[in-house]
Image: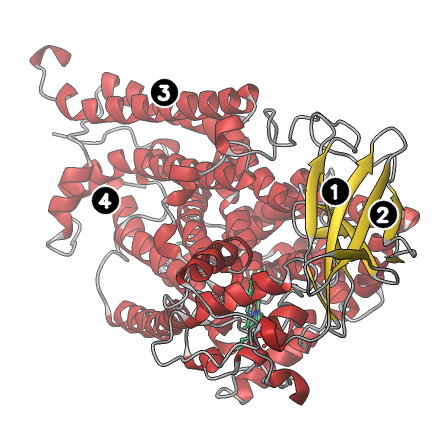
Amino acid sequence: MRCKKQLFLIFILASLIPVRSSAQAWIVPDDQKGKVAPFKFTPVMVKQGEQLYLKNCQSCHGLPGKNNWVRITPPPGDLSLEKAQNQSDGELFYRITNGRIPMPEFRKILSDEERWWLISFLRSFNPRYIQPKPVSQAVFTGKIIQLSLSCDLPSKKVKVMASEALKDSSKIPASGVEVLLFVKRYFGNLQIGDSKSTDKDGIVLFEFPSDLPGDKEGKVEILARVNDPGDQFKSNAVSMKLAIGVPTDKPSLIATKTWWTSRRSAPMWVIMTYSLSVIIVWGFIVYIVYNVLKIRNLNNKPNNQ
Amino acid sequence: MTLEKLILDLTHHIRINKGFLVWMGFLLVSLMVCLYAYSIQLRIGLGVAGIRDYVSWGMYLANFVFFVASSLIGMLISGVLGLIGMKWITPVTRIAETIAVAFAAVAGLVIVSDMGRPERLAYVFLYGRFQSPILWDVTVVITYFVLSSLLLFLPLIADMAIIHRSKQALPSWLRPVYKLLSLNFTDRPEQNKIISRSIRILLILLIPAALSIHTVTSWLFAVTSRAGWDSTIFGPYFVSGAFVAGSATVIIAMFFFRKNYKLQDYLTDLHFTNMGKVLVLVSLVYLYFNLNEFIVPGYKLKRADAVHLHDLLAGKDALLFWVIQIGGLLLPVLFMLFRRFRKPLPITIIAVAVLIAAWFKRYIIVIPTQEHPFLPIQHVPQNFITYAPTLIEILITLAPFILVLIIITLISKFFPVIPLFETAKEKGIEKIEFE
């Protein structure tokens, strides 16, 4: 009934075609707007940014400059155009980091560095862009933390060691550093357990789950980084690939011939049934048309009467 | 009755008169308006329709199901009733075939109106998956259309041969067309043998083709696990519903041809009574499938079904649902049990009610299910959640109806509505000159 009423209304108000209400503004906090990259963008970064873009962003935003973004609400838009390019690097960084549905949050999927590479790539489409002076390492006054990863396979314990690099390039164990451990999955990283702080020797031990699937040899890529929301440290993320998971060799769901695969791996009997039915029925159709056209000539044969 | 009288009766309407021009003009202008609406959709995109992420199959799909459904009647009349030897159907067969051809031809176009990139239609064949009911559906729709067209054409051959030789006044350009279409038919045994054998093959092929066209259309829904579609009886449920819509269409068409083309002596009360009985029969079968379709899930009330059924039977779609079920199915059956309601006028009125209900039935099969997604999307605008068609969408939905009317008008206006040759033989007119 709702529909009928609606039809009626629509006919009356013929000119009123429903227009989608405009989206709420997406506001970037003031203290984030001024944020700038910690390094000067280079052509190599632009290239790396391009790779990341194709993998993570193109599905919605299309190719920059091509205006071929996916038509969804709210519109993702072409990031090479003014709407995005008129924003500061800090604003872009904030949006990519935090996302807003349906724009995904890339905080955990891409590192800070990678998100800046993406911005360098996006900026390469803007000839008027001049990069603000990077807040260089020299200005940085906090601690420099270096992580290292090791693993005791039989007990499935992952050890992360944090050390502080001193000015004279010697190292001392860094205690009280909060460390996060992840496993790389198809899309993004899966956190293992809670974050932990290093002890006085600069060490944390993570219990690795015993049921986490790996590849055929049980290999998974694990990744550790410092949890540092306040930017107190300068630190590196470390990763390594090792056979700590459960070896899994399931054929991919699309490797066999099934209903849900592409046409090329359709089950034989489906192809046969479809093709045979089409051939039989259309065979008859062709046969009938051929015969019916023969009617024209049957008339002319003198021996017919 | 003489052959001259028969030819006169069945072909006197074949002329271009004022009524025809006005009617065609009206149809063409309306079609233009609808096509303009479609051009807007082509330019801007499917967003001009009310379909959104929740309800992505809107009126267009309901319309598609309706058109496929209505076309099935050709198979019921010619195929089933014809093959079991019902004699009374002779004057109705061509009407049924015309309807089948028109609706099947247009059904293919209806589905294009739901495509965002219609120029990629050929991709269905180039890249279609053998596992996909979509590929099966286009295949059977095209096949059924070709079968029905042949079945419309074959009995016309003899009619053309008779008419183009007769003295009957015809538009001058039409006679050569008839001559061409008559394929030099002169009632030779060899010619008759080809025609009757071809017709028999077609009738036999038509039955599985028609069953598959609507079964596959129902599978477009039933192969999903959505509440309201997830049903094993969707095939027969759709097929029986299709016969209801198709029989109603035939009755309405019979009424108009009888009146406008003065065919009272050929489309008699008997034919209306019998079509009424056919409609009662198929309606009862449909009612039976309706009982199964609603009572069985309603008894179990699985969670998603419960939400869906509640909306349908007692919630926001309830009024529409009950009007359709009672006004379009139950009451018509009750009325048509009485002979007096199977007279031409009352039964036509009933058929109109049945047909309107049949369209809205497709609407409540297609749309409400999608308003309850299994994975609700977050932060969606209100117009994603409940579907409301837009004016442009309504106009685009009307276009196929206009097209069907144009096709039926043209076929019925330029060819005899009642099979001439067969009627002559049934009336005992033996001597027909073909030389």
Residue B114 percent coordinates (x, y): 48, 59
Residue B392 percent coordinates (x, y): 47, 75
Same chain assignment for discs 3 and 4: yes
The nearer-to-camera label among 4 and 1 is 1
Residue B178 percent coordinates (x, y): 18, 43
Q: Is residue B57 visible?
A: yes
Looking at marks 3 and 1 on the same chain, the residue that comes earlier in the sequence is marked by 3
- The residue that mark 4 highlights is B4
Chain containing mark 1 = B
- The residue that mark 1 highlights is B231
Quadrant of the image containing the C terminus of chain B: top left
Residue A209's place in the image compared with B189, above or below, is below
Chain containing mark 4 = B
Same chain assignment for discs 4 and 2: yes
- The residue that mark 3 highlights is B197
Looking at marks 4 and 1 on the same chain, the residue that comes earlier in the sequence is marked by 4
Query: Disc 2 residue type?
Result: Pro
Query: Is B86 situated left or right of A291 in this image?
Result: right
Quadrant of the image containing the N terminus of chain B: top left
Query: Disc 4 residue type?
Result: Glu
